[in-house]
Image (cartoon, rainbow, N blue to C red):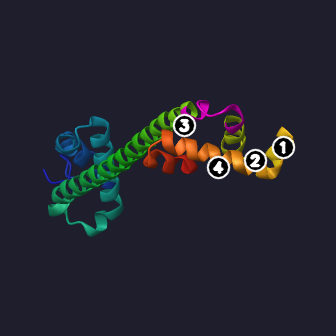
Amino acid sequence: MSMNDNESGAAVSKEEKLKILFRENYHALVFFAFKMLDSKAEAEDVVQDAFVNYWNQQSKVSEEAVKSYLYTTVRNSSLNVLRSRLVAMRHEQEAVGEQSRTILEQLLEAETMAIVHKAIATLPPVCQQIARLSHFEGKRNEEIAVELGISVNSVKTHKQRALQLLRKKLSPELLALVPLLL
């Protein structure tokens, strides 16, 4: 029986032709898409979209080429889904990589700061206090001088002394990182 005629010989409407085409090919097309996508829901979506595309383009598709059109559309749409997945996976991997680097950087920063705090704790009390006010609280020499009731030159002298003592206690590499962490 051709899709143009039913058993009584009457003409078949476009809608009826589509229903017949759908019934005859839907499951095979879903299976075809599923083999590519490994997802029944995505396979069903791709096949339904292929039928919608066919419906919108049926005047341009010859009756002999309908099946080929549907399989080609399903294949191309499935490949697009796979490409989209690949792009999403790459973005996810990049985000995880960046997050891993951030966590590693935070871990290194925490460990470095622990070493610096330990080294500062070994300084004479005034040098400790000035180092903490200057480097951890970000206060200027003038503010420290007012807060401690000493001259600005005394603050500068104690900062220099603290730095000299820290240079002896900390490796040059670690000491170079300190300003970046503060």
Q: What percent of the width, then of the height, locates residue 159?
A: 67, 47
Q: What percent of the width, then of the height, locates residue 155?
A: 75, 47
**Residue at the (46%, 45%) spot, across then down:** 174
Q: Indicate which label's residue lies in the foreground, 3 or 4.
A: 4
Q: Which mark is residue 116?
A: 3
Q: Which mark is residue 138?
A: none
Q: Amino acid at mark 2?
A: Val
Q: Are marks 1 and 2 in contact (CB under 8 Å)?
A: yes
Q: Amino acid at mark 4?
A: Gln
Quick one: SS at disc 1? Answer: loop
**What is the CA distance from the residue labelled 1 to the residue labelled 2?**
7 Å
Q: Are marks 2 and 3 in contact (CB under 8 Å)?
A: no
- Mark 4 vs 2, N-terminal side: 2
Q: Which mark is residue 160?
A: 4
Tell me the residue that label 2 is attached to.
155
* Image side of residue 120 versus residue 139, left or right: left
**What is the CA distance from the residue labelled 2 to the residue labelled 3?**
20 Å
